[in-house]
Image (spheres, rainbow, N blue to C red):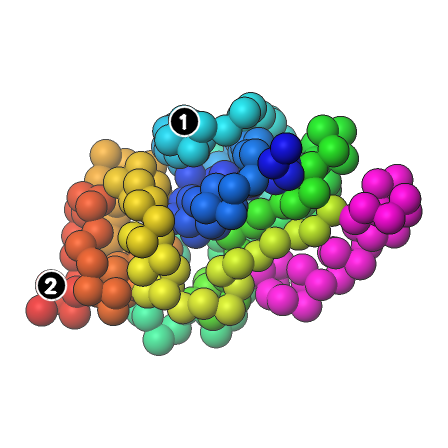
Amino acid sequence: MSKKAIVLISGGLDSCVSSFIAKDKGYELYGISFYYGQRHEKEIECAKKICKTLDVRDHIILDIDFNKFSKTSLLKSSLNNISNHDLDEIGKKIPSTYVSGRNTVFLSLALSYAESIDADYIFLGVNSVDYSGYPDCRPEYIKAFQEMANLALKKAIEGNPIKIETPLINLKKYEIIKIGSRLKTPFADTWSCYRGQKKACGRCDSCLIRLKGFKEAKIKDPLYYDYLPKWYIS
């Protein structure tokens, strides 16, 4: 019998590639996604498509409304516009799109789900190299959360801890894209833009990081963009 793995699917490129790595390892997959009050639902639509392609045994979508207490620019309730930066500015400080405690909440719920179905792994697509400055995407954060999980769960106390797998955490974006290409990851079904328009904006931090990765990987990004930087098309 295949071991079970929970895959956290945001609808973005990294979570998609991370999930396809889990699939490639032969695990029986269970998907979990979160509608947390973000500005658009496009990434949830992408998450559903990705889970269908992955043929997950079950896909749970949880509704957690961060709008009730957070005003980050990534949420519907925010009156602040999402700031755009140049590539060399990204990651130098924590951006306005940071959602306080988001990965802690998501991982805690994923742990509960994992223990309830006796899963052995949780796959999370965090990345600490080409990242936007989020503190809960760093290796030291994952290490600390793993230590907490080992203390918190009955499954761990009985000698079967749930392992948090972050296969992309030390990779550059172009390396992630190359792995995804090899695993036939459906890049066209992923969404990275902070805005939920018909086309990706091509200007926000997430779009710029994605475009840079595809350019360096020498692979064409299948998404349509409202704007493409000159350095990308040159």
Residue 233 pos. (x, y %): 11, 63
Where disc 2 sits, the SS reads helix
Query: Which of the numbered marks, if any, corresponds to residue 52?
Result: 1
Q: Name the amino acid, label 2.
A: Ile
Q: Is residue 224 left or right of residue 112?
A: left
- Residue 158 on the magenta segment: yes
Residue 75 visible in the snapshot: no
Instruction: Tell me which amino acid carries mark 1.
Output: Lys
Tell me what residue is drawn at x 86 percent, y 48 percent.
159
Distance in Å between CA atoms under marks 2 and 1: 33 Å
Checking the image for residue 233, the label placed there is 2
Crowding near the residue tagged with mark 2, few <14, some 14–19, many ≥20 C-alpha atoms within 10 Å: few
Assign the N terminus to one quadrant of the image. Answer: top right
Give the percent coordinates (x, y) of residue 157: 90, 47
Q: Residue at x 26, y 45 (%)?
A: 200
Is residue 225 covered in magenta? no
Task: Provide the residue span drawn in magenta.
Answer: 134-161
